Amino acid sequence: MNTPYDNELPVWERPEPKPRAAPVPLSREKIATVAIRIADEHGLDGLSVRKIAKELDVGPMRLYGYVLNRSELLDLMVDVVYARIADVDRRETWRDEVTAIACATRAAALDHEWFSDLLGGRPHLGPHALAVGEATAAALSRAPGVRDIDDLQRALGVLDAFITGAIRREVTERRTTRSTGTDEAAFQVSRGPYLTRMLDTGRFPTVARLVVEGAHLNPEETFSHNLTTILDGITRRHDA
């Protein structure tokens, strides 16, 4: 059975088809740009070769000379987003560098919500994804708590888990707000009477404290605060 990984060369290393006399010139960059525009509007479920071909005013079969399957198309799209993340200005300290990359990743995912659906799986290996990975690993390798390759792998793992989880949670809330017409605050108000009755039983004292006393930070503040906590932990591991 053929798999998306059977090809000898990945899409980034295969030459593009030779230019041909046609009313509409094509390139992988042009295909990826249109695919991203469709995914931004309709999500990954609404993305298809047929829709891309229609937007480009070409026959669907012509696109398969540039991308062999959906996996390659997604690879190209993802790497365009990583190009934006890789473009952040370099920082002097490891901590500022990691923070800049993390915040750029969040911003890119909020602009292209489908990107969050492709995080957390197998590594992305496009040239721009590798550039972001190199910058992140190089910065974390300078952290005081990272003493060897095992420490670096663990630090990368926990940072990636945080970024992926935080982005997916925020994107999920945005999608839920759009699909239900009810934002998080309105949802909490609608469930207020029920929650009050449950908390009044005294069975959930810690949850009650969180509801009554907990700070209601906006997503950006929450992301920044929790990222600081993660980086503090990586730093202090040296002392432990």
Image (cartoon, rainbow, N blue to C red):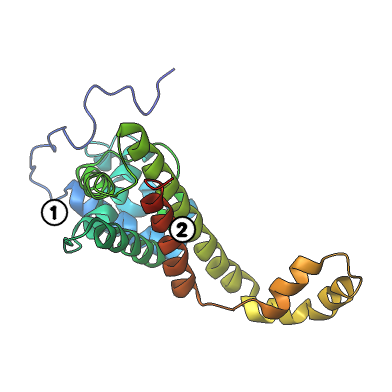
Give left or right: position of 51 versus 89: right
Q: Of circles 2 and 1, which is in front? A: 2
Q: In this orientation, does residue 123 appear?
A: no
Task: Residue type at mark 2: give it.
Answer: Gly
Q: Residue at point 13% right, 37% down?
A: 17
Residue type, label 1:
Pro
Read off the residue under disc 2: 43
Q: Residues within 10 Å of mark 1 (few under 14, many from 20)?
A: few
Bin the neighbour count of mark 2 within 10 Å (Cα to Cα): few under 14, some 14-19, many 20 and up.
some
Q: Residue furthest top?
A: 1
Q: Position of residue 231 (x, y in %)?
A: 38, 56
Q: Nearer the viewer, residue 31 or 228?
A: 228
Look at the picture and state if 223 lies above or below 33. below
Query: In the image, is 77 to the left or to the right of 48?
Result: left
Q: Residue at x 64, y 76 (%)?
A: 214
Judged from the image, the secondary structure of the residue bearing numbered disc 2 is loop
Give the residue number, with chain letter if any, for mark 1. 23
Quadrant where the N terminus lies? top left
Identify which residue, 83 or 54, lies in the foreground. 83
Could you tell me if residue 159 is visible in this image? yes
Q: Position of residue 51 (x, y in %)?
A: 38, 54
Question: Residue 3 falls in which quadrant of the image?
Answer: top left
